[in-house]
Amino acid sequence: NAGVTQTPKFQVLKTGQSMTLQCAQDMNHNSMYWYRQDPGMGLRLIYYSASEGTTDKGEVPNGYNVSRLNKREFSLRLESAAPSQTSVYFCASLPRDSYSYEQYFGPGTRLTVT
Amino acid sequence: AQSVTQLDSQVPVFEEAPVELRCNYSSSVSVYLFWYVQYPNQGLQLLLKYLSGSTLVESINGFEAEFNKSQTSFHLRKPSVHISDTAEYFCAVSYAGATNKLIFGTGTLLAVQP
């Protein structure tokens, strides 16, 4: 199993450009998450999807949209990138009947908006 | 609002010395507690977790954490650190009734010096 994969690993955008960050998991997990990590602020939840077909806002959703394409894939879209969205983005997943409550993380996407 | 506090943003320590990384959470009836570790330029990995039962939990690489309900704390300790323990450590909490969501602290950088 590859676990949770993210593409791309690095990206540089100009202000106003759009892009989609891709996330996929091959563990048959139901819930998926998008976080951003900024220095001194830990990880903050952007959006999550408790199951295929549902999405919900997290702590910092403004400027982002998400799509739960199927059970495996959960994408994050920046429609008009801003320098404040410069960050490291992590995708994570969680099994449905998880009695361990452990989220599994991808390797991250480092995004710079100039 | 529910929150997790990691008071120390950075902890420098010499190799083979003991270390404690502090974590406090806002009080709730029932919580699940986690420590994640992030090595440089990598994603997050679960280090250890408390779900129920014994309040002292251990990891395979010598870390331990103790759940203290009265002090709402979950401090991470290791009696003798190695250079390879240099990483950022995140405390996270999941609350009963919202077990599919994690709230992270701001992280503590453990810098082990020779």
Image (cartoon, coloured by chain):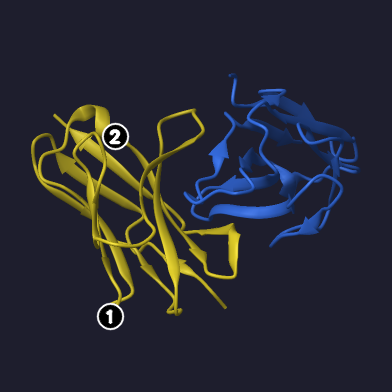
Chain colours: A blue, B yellow
Q: Could you tell me which quadrant the C terminus of chain B lies in?
A: top left
Answer above or below: position of B44 versus B75: above
Disc 1 chain ID: B
Give residue B113's quadrant in the image.
top left
Q: Could you tell me which quadrant the N terminus of chain B lies in?
A: bottom right
Residue A6's spot in the image, x, y percent? 68, 27
Answer with left or right where residue A75 lies relative to residue B19.
right
Pointer 2 local density, CA inside 10 Å: few below 14, some 14–19, many at least 20: many
Residues at marks 2 and 1 touching, judged by CB atoms closer than 8 Å: no
Identified at 75% across, 45% down, the residue is A83
Residue A17's spot in the image, x, y percent? 90, 35
Tell me the residue that label 1 is attached to: B70
Give residue B4's quadrant in the image.
bottom left
Dot in front, 2 or 1:
1
Q: B61 and A90: which one is in front?
A: B61
Disc 2 chain ID: B
Q: Secondary structure at mark 2?
A: loop
Q: Which mark is residue B83?
A: none
Q: Secondary structure at mark 1?
A: loop
Tell me the residue that label 2 is attached to: B86
Residue B9's spot in the image, x, y percent? 36, 54
Q: Amino acid at mark 2?
A: Thr
